Amino acid sequence: MKQIVVIGAGAAGLMAAGVAASRGSRVVLLEKNDRAGKKLRITGKGRCNLTTAVDRDDLIKGFPGNGRFLYSAFHSFSNDDVREFFHARGMETKVERGNRVFPVSDKAEDVVRILRDFVMQNGTNVIYNEAVSQITLHEGKVHAVKSKDKEYRADAVILATGGMSYPTTGSTGDGYRLAERLGHSIVQPRPGLVPLVADEPWVKDLQGLSLKNVKAVSYNDKGKKINEDFGEMLFTHFGISGPIILSMSRDIGDYIYKKQKNVKVMLDLKPALSAEKMDERLQRDFDKYSRKMFKNALQDLLPQKLIPVIITLSGIDPEKECHHITREERHTLGYLLKNFSITISQTRPIKEAIVTAGGVNVKEVDPKTMESRLIQGLYLAGEVMDIDGYTGGFNLQAAFSTGFLAGQYASE
């Protein structure tokens, strides 16, 4: 019977351990926390966006970070397979906006429970509070896994320790260090899906404001478009966050990281209105409130919290009565509402990121088996590798798919 040690009881590690054990291997799962799935429990604000319902062909497009590497993994264990895996174990799923898939119960705990049961029912020996310090080799092949006090003999090792985001859940880069000691190269870890830091001081005044149905477009320092998205966003005390900003942050952060230059995010606060329709709307509002001061005439158009900032940036006298506002001033206001500019100088730190970009270089991993090309018997799964996707269930799908493949081939 093959002896397999899995390091890390997150999404990838649990799937890998369960698959390997179900195929007849003797599996030991080592987790440095006191319980499994610590990060899984908080994903999707505790609801767990476990995969995406996009077509299989579109799965790869959801990964700006080495998506093509995942082709075999998704073919072996697709997003449909993930949903069927949980359905077969009594957990129904539902599809929400943006093809996001959640448990019908809205409880991440249900996802963790099913994975934990899958592991235990197949006879895996799960050991908590066990931090791994070293993977030892014998003649270029994995031989054992060492913790502070113990050594675990291994015919194969599956490294599924995650990245560096949310370090309180145990993702502290341990896997990078273990892999690097074995000769693997590490692509510099950096934030993947992460809030953005704005230069403008007025963002603090908008803290807590959520905007729906806005269009955001980012431009580099040369005025070239980086990316765009449509949907919901949030202002924070340091800048901007929310679904569309997190989705855009990967490419924006990459540009800032590589070029050391600022990025502009332009918000269209009223994307349903053309510039012409926007002007007509402003005319109607100013006619309606013709005798009111400008500062009291925007409540039909904008959230209350946003009005003082827009007034200041428009340069229009807030005390001016609406019937005295000039055509030029109105056009300036309309342009501002369609091109609300925010300067992004940096991302928030990696510890606040949802996912880590960077990690073990995928050129050193066989995409068909997840086995290391450098060390026989070493397999990798999940975020420890240099793979990262957009928000919306892509990253958990990658964890499940690579975990499945690693468990399958490690046990053969």
Image (cartoon, grey):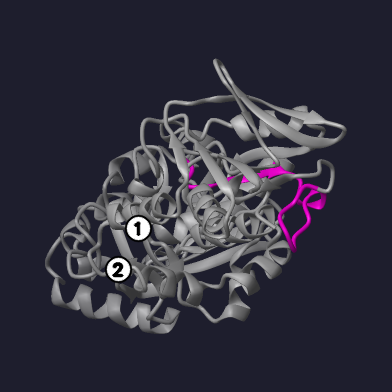
Q: Position of residue 383 (x, y in %)?
A: 59, 47
Marks 1 and 2: in contact by CB < 8 Å?
Answer: yes
- Quadrant in which the C terminus is drawn: bottom right
The residue that mark 2 highlights is 91
Q: Position of residue 130 (x, y in %)?
A: 48, 26
Which residue is at a point 68% across and 64% down the rendered structure image? 70
Q: Position of residue 368 (x, y in %)?
A: 75, 63
Q: Earlier in the sequence, mark 2 or mark 1?
A: 2
Q: Is residue 191 visible?
A: yes
The amino acid type found where label 1 is placed reads Ile
Q: Is residue 264 above or below residue 38?
A: below
Q: Secondary structure at mark 1?
A: helix
Does 150 sit left or right of 83 as displayed? right
Magenta residues, start to end: 353-372
**22 is within the stretch colored magenta:** no
Q: Is residue 114 above or below residue 355?
A: below
Q: Main secondary structure of the magenta part?
A: loop
**How many marks do you count on the picture?**
2
Does 374 sit left or right of 214 as displayed? right
Which residue is at a point 75% across and 60% down the rendered structure image? 367
Does 281 sit left or right of 340 as displayed? left
CA neighbours of label 2 inside 10 A, class few (<14), some (14 to 19), many (20+): some
Q: Position of residue 57 (x, y in %)?
A: 63, 80
**355 is within the stretch colored magenta:** yes
Near-viewer residue (281 or 160): 160
Q: Is residue 324 above or below residue 45?
A: below
The residue that mark 1 highlights is 114
